[in-house]
Image (cartoon, rainbow, N blue to C red):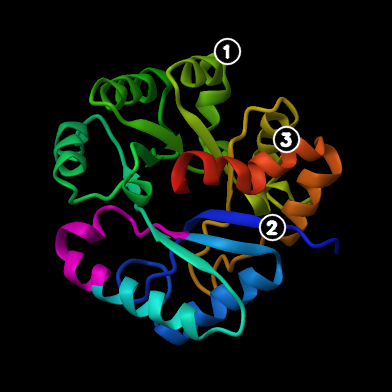
Amino acid sequence: MEEYHMTDIHMHIIPGVDDGSFTIDMSKSMITMAYMQGVRTIFATPHSGAFISRKELIQENYQKMKEQTKKFPFGVDLFLGSEVRCETGNIHETLRYLKTGTFPSMNRTKYVLTEFRNRICPREALKIISLLRRDGWFPIIAHVEYYPALFLSEVIEEILNYGCLLQINAYSLEEEAEEAAFERARKLLLEQKVSFLGSDAHRMNHRPPSVKKGLEYVYKHCTKEYADAVAFGNAEKYLIN
């Protein structure tokens, strides 16, 4: 494989805080696996609900992981964010938690990794997005290929017109992926509507950090300029620098 450079903006790498990694050793194995496939920067994104009851543990284990990465024989940068669950029934509470910093944005920027329920309807999604934008947040729609209703009519265009950015899971570009998600992810990518890749990795034995084939697909089917932007450039532009 040609050596690629990727920023994974969606990984449940902090151990013992949500349904992601169980232990520090598992997190170290996940980071090593990701590195071997080209990942050089990782955003740790626990589910937002974990920050309500386990915020101190998240911060403690995040710092432990930062220390562990310094001991690796290779270089990996680690940043903190959260996968913020947004539904109409809790959106005002969610906005309050974002404002107070209970739910961290991506590396303390105005960008929020935004998760919907799988069967969200376009009207609900657009209402949530409008409220986030009203309060100055820029949603990054997490694994957008898994919200089938958003692909009806011109909903994706409306979402982009709000100033949102889209993240797809790298494994959704693999031929072995769920067919509908593969088709939606590929369509968005070839239309150059994707801004970020993520693994949405949880554990070594459940949704491991598998990005190699997806990353290869991006570079095979897109221009080098756009592939670089999706793989790492946009993350550097919007979330790091």
Give the image quarter of residue 56: bottom left
202 and 112: which is toward the camera: 112
Picture coordinates of residue 153 (x, y %)?
A: 57, 12
Q: Is residue 47 magenta?
A: yes
| Residue under the point 80% across and 48% down | 217
Q: Residues within 10 Å of mark 1 (few under 14, many from 20)?
A: few
Element marked by disc 3: helix
152 and 42: which is toward the camera: 42
| Residue under the point 31% across and 31% down | 137
Q: Amino acid at mark 2?
A: His
On the question of residue 176 being in view, the answer is no
Which residue is the extreme one toward the front? 241
Q: Which of the marked residues, 1 or 3, is nearer the chain's N terminus?
A: 1
Residue 14 vertical placement versus 185 (above, below): below
Q: CA distance from mark 1 to mark 3?
A: 25 Å
Q: Amino acid at mark 3?
A: Tyr
Residue 5 vertical placement versus 36 (above, below): above
Q: Residues within 10 Å of mark 3 (few under 14, many from 20)?
A: some
Q: Do callouts 1 and 3 mark residues in contact (Cβ within 8 Å)? A: no
Q: Which residue is mark 3?
A: 226
Q: CA distance from mark 1 to mark 2?
A: 34 Å
Q: Which of the marked residues, 1 or 2, is nearer the chain's N terminus?
A: 2
The circle drawn on residue 5 is: 2
Picture coordinates of residue 141 (x, y %)?
A: 46, 36
Q: Which residue is mark 1?
A: 153
49 and 33: which is toward the camera: 33
Residue 185 vertical placement versus 203 (above, below): above
Magenta residues, start to end: 43-59
Q: Which of the marked residues, 2 or 3, is nearer the chain's N terminus?
A: 2
